[in-house]
Image (cartoon, rainbow, N blue to C red):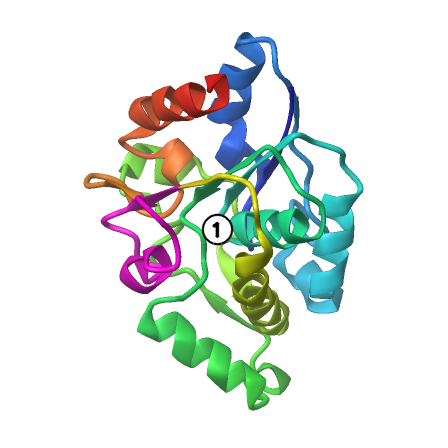
Amino acid sequence: MSILLLHGFTGHPSDLAPLKTAFEAHGWACQLPLLPGHGTRPQNLDSIRATDWIDCAKSYDSDVIVGLSMGALLAVILAAERPKSKLILLSPAFYLKPVGRFTAWACQKGLWHVLKSIPKTAGSDIADPVARAKSQAYHEISLKGLVEFDWLRKQAIQALPQVSCPMYSFFGAKDHTVDIVKSSALLKDSVIFERSAHILPLDYDQKELISQCLKILEK
């Protein structure tokens, strides 16, 4: 079995590294790419289109996709076009919290022309302060990139009914990024981790998440 792991917008492959390590220990082949515009400077997201992320994800063959946040949206879009055996969606960003929704709306109206980025004042969305301090994700958000993310988000919602494989979803109750009520309503039987925030693989419920993912993959 081959597994593709996809990180989120402004994120980094290290956000999913604990899962990759656990999966490989069970003998499964894993691929964890760096999506275009990430892992360098936040400004590099200014020139990236959402289709660049889709094309990058499509370039990897896999039986299973594990996606975090925007990576979960990519997983849905790919599975709608080409069936997979299963999807594991971590904090899928179908709907953002009000601040994120307003910022995306303002960017659509042209905010990014006058303001290039906004800082993540509280750092990465991780409840565990030790893990948050070690995060390799960007510490600011490209507003031009946010426009592309919002387009991708809408595409994923439209693609969701075309996904025929089993989907397993997980959210953190302390998520400050995703509206977990509205997002989980699009899915069945989502698991909510009470102690964790958005970047689930690095947060307090990491061990339980890994355990549940292994059970899903062993089915």
Query: Residue 205 at what x, y percent from top left?
Result: 28, 30
The three-letter code of the residue at mark 1 reads: Ser
Left or right of 63 on screen, residue 138: left
Decide which of 58, 53 is in the foreground and name it: 58
**Number of numbered discs visible in the structure rendering:** 1
Q: Residue furthest bottom?
A: 109
Which residue corresponds to the image point at 49% horizontal and 54% vertical from the top-left? 139
Q: Which residue is mark 1?
A: 69
Residue 171 located within the stretch drawn in magenta: yes
Left or right of 44 on screen, residue 120: left
Which quadrant of the rendered structure holds the N terminus? Answer: top right
**Crowd band around label 1 with a 10 angstrom C-alpha radius: few (<14), some (14–19), many (20+):** many
Left or right of 119 on screen, residue 163: right
State which quadrant residue 103 falls in.
Answer: bottom left
Residue 140 located within the stretch drawn in magenta: no
Query: Residue 134 at what x, y percent from top left?
Result: 43, 35
Q: Which residues are magenta?
A: 169-190
Q: Residue furthest left?
A: 194
Decide which of 20, 156 is in the foreground and name it: 156
Query: Residue 132 at what x, y percent from top left?
Result: 36, 40
Which residue corresponds to the image point at 45% horizontal and 64% vertical from the top-left? 119
Which residue corresponds to the image point at 37% horizontal and 38% vertical from the top-left? 200
Decide which of 209, 103 is in the foreground and name it: 209
Query: Residue 212 at what x, y percent from top left?
Result: 36, 25
Q: Is residue 88 above or below residue 28?
A: below
Decide which of 188, 113 is in the foreground and name it: 188
Q: Is residue 213 above or below residue 181?
A: above
State which quadrant residue 151 falls in.
Answer: bottom right
Q: Residue furthest front?
A: 164
Identify the secondary structure beneath mark 1. loop
